[in-house]
């Protein structure tokens, strides 16, 4: 059973992803910068991608703390892992071949979409903390 929050309107007001301006600024512009960086040489591309993935991961992490947005709890760490993979590929530590940038870009996009849609489909848009769930369960006893 999906545990829906009791005060979703209050929580949604804190959600950066619910406002198109902050959504565009925190995730849309970095995503666009990553696409544009595809035209750059590999070292510059790696710098832009790493910075933008780190930016989006931090935005997800902070948004999850602000409003408990379900997918942000998962996509934040995912973006950090992707930033590490980009750094590994650019430095030669991660040997994924000559199509590495396409693989990393596709994995980033597909992974984000799957994690975003899948987590909110399974657990709802906002998740409650374990402490809140525990205190509700104690009140029932």
Image (cartoon, rainbow, N blue to C red):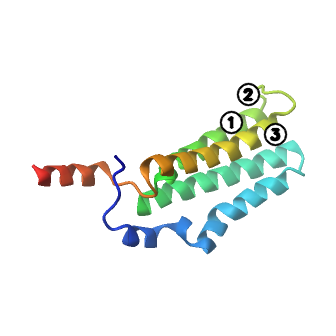
Residue 80 at x, y = what percent? 60, 44
Identify the secondary structure beneath mark 2. Answer: loop
- Is label 3 in contact with label 2 (beta carbons under 8 Å)? no
Q: In percent of the image, x 29 and y 48: which residue is there? A: 130
Secondary element type, mark 3: helix
Q: Which mark is residue 102?
A: 3
Q: Comparing marks 1 and 3, which lies closer to the viewer?
A: 3
Q: Which residue sits at x=65%, y=38%? A: 84
Q: Which x, y percent locates residue 49?
A: 74, 49
Q: Is mark 1 on a helix, strand or loop?
A: helix
Q: Which mark is residue 60?
A: none
- Vertical side of 74 occupied by 56: above or below: below
Residue 139's image quarter? bottom left
Q: Mark 1 points at which residue?
A: 85
Identify the residue under disc 2: 94
Q: Are marks 1 and 2 in contact (CB under 8 Å)?
A: yes
Cα distance between the residues tagged 3 and 2: 14 Å
Q: How crowded is mark 3: few (under 14 residues within 10 Å), some or many (20 or more)?
A: few
Say above or below: 15 vs 106. Answer: below
Vertical placement of 104 versus 60: above or below? above
């Amino acid at each position: 059973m999906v545990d829906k929050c009791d005060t979703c309107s209050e929580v949604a007001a804190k959600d950066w992803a619910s406002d198109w301006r902050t959504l565009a600024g925190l995730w849309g512009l970095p995503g666009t910068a990553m696409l544009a960086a595809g035209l750059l040489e590999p070292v510059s591309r790696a710098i832009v991608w790493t910075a933008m993935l780190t930016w989006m991961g931090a935005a997800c992490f902070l948004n999850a703390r602000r409003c408990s947005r379900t997918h942000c709890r998962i996509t934040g760490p995912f973006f950090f892992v992707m930033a590490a993979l980009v750094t590994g590929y650019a430095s030669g530590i991660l040997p994924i071949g000559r199509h590495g940038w396409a693989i990393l870009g596709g994995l980033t996009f597909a992974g984000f979409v799957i994690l975003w849609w899948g987590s909110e489909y399974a657990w709802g848009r906002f998740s409650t903390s374990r402490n809140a769930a525990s205190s509700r369960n104690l009140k029932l006893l």
